[in-house]
Image (cartoon, rainbow, N blue to C red):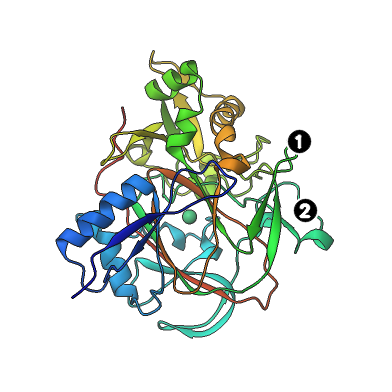
Amino acid sequence: MKPTISIQPLTHPNSEVDFGAEIRYADLENLSDEDFALIRDALYNHHVVVFKDQQSLSPRAQYELTKRFDPASDNYGHGKTLDAKRSILHPDLKTVPHQPQVQVIGNGFVEEYEGLQNVQLRHPHHRTFHRDHIPDEEDYDFTRFYRWHIDAALYDLNPPRVTTLMAVSVPKGRRQTLRYDDGSNETLDVPLGTTAFVSGQRMFDLLSPEDQEFVRTSRVEYAAHPYIWMSPARSLPTGLGLYTEDRELAESDLPPIDESKILTLPMLWKNPVSGKFALQVHPSAVRRIHRADGTVIDDLATVRETVYRLQRPAISPQYVYAHDWQEGDLVLFNNQGVLHSVVGAFKPDELRLFRQCNLAASEPPVGP
Ligand SMILES: [Fe+2]
């Protein structure tokens, strides 16, 4: 008899992290509607769920599992916008030719994988995004959050509900010390190449009543073509948003803008299972804040300082779940309920090969 699915919440010693679960005994190639309903509930209750030993799962099955969370969706979360060579996301993702909603990411040279040949993968390194860098001689010992984000195009397409990440190859052994370098002296011991997650629900809960009212009643307008717009800008050392140095591209330097495709979204997104709210803002892509009274915060520095003040408490070390990747791990995360960041600095010969899939949602996130 097939064992029934079991859901084990992850334990986080010496930490305040209150999310994450491991799901066992799921047959992801032949998932019944009942089993999928259990997985969906687990995803929305635990935000990050891990399936072990999924090496044999095909890109097609990964895509189908991702799509099951939103059957009316079909486009990759960034659509075809990654083709734009000036997008800051362009160098990081290679599309699986026979399953274009699935991307290969990682580090090192890969001769052949799923129809991709002779690809050079590059793990995003903070020196390509942060204004100030960890000195080269410390680079293998210390690292940063590269960029806190939601997986989302934030122009034309709705933010995906779920991202699935499969670890095919993982370099072993090393750990690094993550530094915040923002004057707080906060650090976090992390496995090499971890993916860091924080809960948007926690981010909301940590706010004062006044700030909770502010985020409940305000909306965020995202920049048009945000990943091209922000490409010359430089990140804060926490990876939580950008310095305002007037480096963003002018409208005349962007692809044509269709005003109807600019996204203005609630700051709080409702969990479809628990009904709880998560503070979900992409800190690097924000352009304006629309207040309940109809006023607009237009000054970019003020917009960024406001978002940073709201988000920074929840990325402190005690709230960060740093997943320790093992080969065969398939992680699903609630992209409308967590923020995540790439972490780490690899040596050129350290091979890391991951598959990522998410789909632009068929509906916008639901606000308060
Ligand atoms: Fe991501």
What kind of residue is marked 2? Ile
Is residue 328 left or right of 85 when viewed as pictured? left
Between the residue at mark 1 and the residue at mark 2, the CA separation in whole angstroms equals 14 Å
Q: In the rendered view, does 107 fall on the left or right side of 25? A: right
In the rendered image, the vertical position of residue 218 relative to residue 91, given as above or below = above
Residue 134 disc label: 2
| Quarter of image, res 263 | top left
Mark whose residue sits in front, 1 or 2: 1
Residue 76: quadrant of the picture? bottom left
Disc 1 on helix, strand or loop?
loop
Q: Which residue is mark 1?
A: 183
Query: Which residue is the extreme one toward the left?
Result: 33
| Farthest-out residue, bottom | 111
| Local crowd size for mark 2, using a 10 Å CA cut-off: few (<14), some (14–19), many (≥20) | some
109 with respect to 133 (left or right): left
Which percent across, then down, holds residue 81? 42, 57
**Residue at 49% in and 66% down:** 93
Q: Position of residue 163 (x, y in %)?
A: 38, 57
Sequence-first tag of 1 and 2: 2
Residue 102 occupies quadrant: bottom left
The image's mark for residue 255 is: none
Q: Residue at x 62, y 43 (%)?
A: 317
